[in-house]
Image: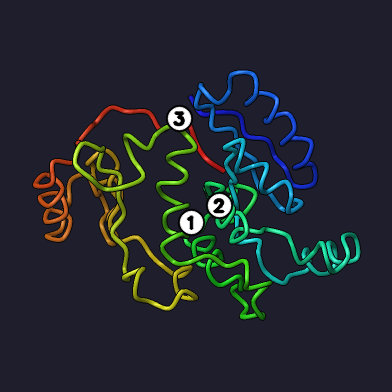
């Protein structure tokens, strides 16, 4: 089962103290994967505490941008020094904190590619200057935190999060190469084919994906079978991330 996740927008220090107490009293042997969700503002000393207590940081990095919230609301409240430290993804990564990510849907619009983009660029869709770009992470780190990282948070890394033999074939075929396009174009990515447990559940331009498979989808399924990836028709996606 997933470990507890505490929404730590302003109270990360208090939440972390609770997690440290649990960790000292047997938590280090239980693989609880305690998580701080959102992790908007946290003291640099607490980042080191997170790493020592093996607490995960679940970010929604589409918020890492100059907008009315970070400037009009947060800047007068926090001051320039603390405002510059919000969403410190790179600092956490350097300290050894495991990162996970999500969209915060339905609070935010459902675009799973936007946080992948802004984790790297720290720039919103309107092209504003990067929000403290020194906290941006690499492209591979961003893709990892939003796939394997989130699967790890939910104790699902043995089933999903990467494509490899023995795991269930949860995948998406995109309309662009995410390793080659400009990072600022990742947020515009569209899914051409989606599979869950080896079953096609979405196919761009298809009326009924389950009965009308294109050559591309058949080729994808054949490739998966060749790798030995698990094809399961009955499994639960009841646990969800942020």
Which residue is drawn at the image coordinates 31% and 68% (left, top)? 175
Residue highlighted by disc 3: 238
Residue highlighted by disc 1: 112
Q: Is residue 114 above or below residue 207?
A: below
Q: Is residue 161 above or below residue 17?
A: below
Q: Earlier in the sequence, mark 1 or mark 3?
A: 1
How packed mark 1 is, by other alpha carbons closer than 10 Å (few <14, some 14-19, many 20 or more), is: many
Which residue is drawn at the image coordinates 70% and 25% (left, top)? 21
Residue highlighted by disc 2: 103
Dot 1: what SS? loop
Which residue is drawn at the image coordinates 82% and 61% (left, top)? 82
How far apart are the two marked residues, 1 and 3, measured between alpha carbons? Answer: 18 Å
How far apart are the two marked residues, 1 and 2, measured between alpha carbons? Answer: 6 Å
Q: Quadrant of residue 63?
A: bottom right
How packed mark 2 is, by other alpha carbons closer than 10 Å (few <14, some 14-19, many 20 or more), is: many
Which residue is drawn at the image coordinates 79% and 41% (left, top)? 11
How far apart are the two marked residues, 3 and 2, measured between alpha carbons? Answer: 17 Å
Task: Give x and y (percent) for residue 165.
Answer: 19, 41
Q: Quadrant of residue 238?
A: top left
């Amino acid at each position: 089962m997933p470990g507890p996740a505490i929404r730590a927008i302003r109270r990360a220090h208090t939440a972390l103290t609770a997690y440290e107490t649990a960790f000292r009293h047997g938590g280090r042997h239980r693989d609880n994967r305690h998580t701080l969700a959102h992790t908007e503002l946290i003291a640099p000393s607490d980042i080191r505490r997170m790493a020592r207590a093996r607490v995960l940081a679940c970010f929604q990095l589409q918020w890492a941008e100059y907008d009315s919230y970070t400037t009009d609301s947060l800047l007068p409240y926090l001051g320039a020094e603390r405002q510059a430290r919000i969403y410190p993804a790179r600092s956490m990564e350097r300290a050894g904190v495991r990162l996970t990510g999500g969209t915060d849907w339905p609070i935010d619009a459902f675009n799973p590619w936007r946080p992948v983009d802004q984790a790297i660029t720290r720039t919103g869709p309107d092209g504003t200057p990067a929000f403290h770009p020194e906290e941006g992470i690499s492209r591979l780190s961003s893709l990892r935190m939003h796939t394997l990282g989130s699967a790890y948070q939910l104790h699902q890394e043995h089933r999903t999060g990467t494509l490899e033999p023995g795991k269930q074939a949860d995948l998406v075929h995109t309309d662009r190469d995410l390793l080659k396009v400009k990072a600022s174009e990742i947020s515009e990515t569209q899914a051409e084919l989606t599979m869950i447990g080896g079953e096609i559940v979405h196919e761009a331009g298809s009326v009924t994906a389950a009965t009308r498979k294109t050559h591309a989808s058949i080729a994808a399924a054949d490739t998966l079978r060749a790798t030995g990836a698990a094809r399961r028709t009955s499994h639960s996606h009841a646990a969800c991330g942020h």
